[in-house]
Image (cartoon, rainbow, N blue to C red):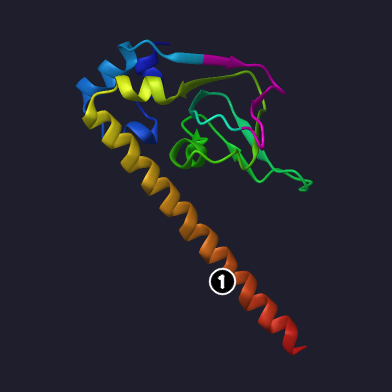
Amino acid sequence: MSLLEMIEDIPLFKNFSEEEKKAFAKMDHSMQAFNKGDTIIKEGEHYTSLYLLVRGTAQVTREGYDSPVAVLKAGSAFGEISFLTRRARQSNVIANENSLAIKIDDAFFAKLDPAMRDNIKNYLIELLANRLDSMNEALSKIAKYARGYAVL
């Protein structure tokens, strides 16, 4: 399967034109393969690469938590907070199975056409806004539950 076929249905590329998708697929990528159990991102590291999972699944874990925070599937972008803010990694990402990811670092990002960079940044903003909405909704439910529990 070609890279163009792999990225065709990935949400990050939804606002890319067909020509932009083709141009992206032809670029010299930092494609990385991971085996089941490999650590893709380690909590506390200061690397700022963004990853796009094109095949496989991975789990997001955090120190001090017994179960995964999230499970990522093909099409997921991760590492965006460190990519945008230059802060240390907030979590671990571990491959659940043999997986393939595109690593987008500053050097690769700089090679992209400005319209492609804008599309990626806009997607990341939308992704983070959706995550914030989900967290706010979860916190609201927790607060409502806690208020009900406190009355008892």
In percent of width and height, residue 21 lies at 28, 22
Q: Quadrant of the N terminus?
A: top left
In percent of width and height, residue 108 lies at 38, 20
Kindly identify which residue carries mark 1.
140
- Crowding at mark 1 (Cα within 10 Å: few <14, some 14-19, many 20+): few
Q: Nearer the viewer, residue 139 or 63?
A: 63
Q: How many marks?
A: 1
In percent of width and height, residue 121 lies at 34, 39
- In the displayed structure image, the side of residue 128 where residue 17 appears, left or right: left
Q: Is residue 63 one of those drawn in magenta?
A: no
Residue under the point 37% across and 48% down: 126
Q: Nearer the viewer, residue 47 or 10?
A: 47
Q: Nearer the viewer, residue 8 or 66?
A: 66
Residue lying furthest bottom: 151
Quarter of the image where one finds residue 73:
top right
In percent of width and height, residue 116 lies at 27, 29
Q: Amino acid at mark 1?
A: Ser
- Find the magenta span and give its range: 32-45
Q: Quadrant of the C terminus?
A: bottom right
Residue under the point 69% across and 21% down: 36
- In the displayed structure image, the side of residue 111 where residue 60 appears, left or right: right
Q: Nearer the viewer, residue 88 or 10?
A: 88
Q: Determine the secondary structure under disc 1.
A: helix
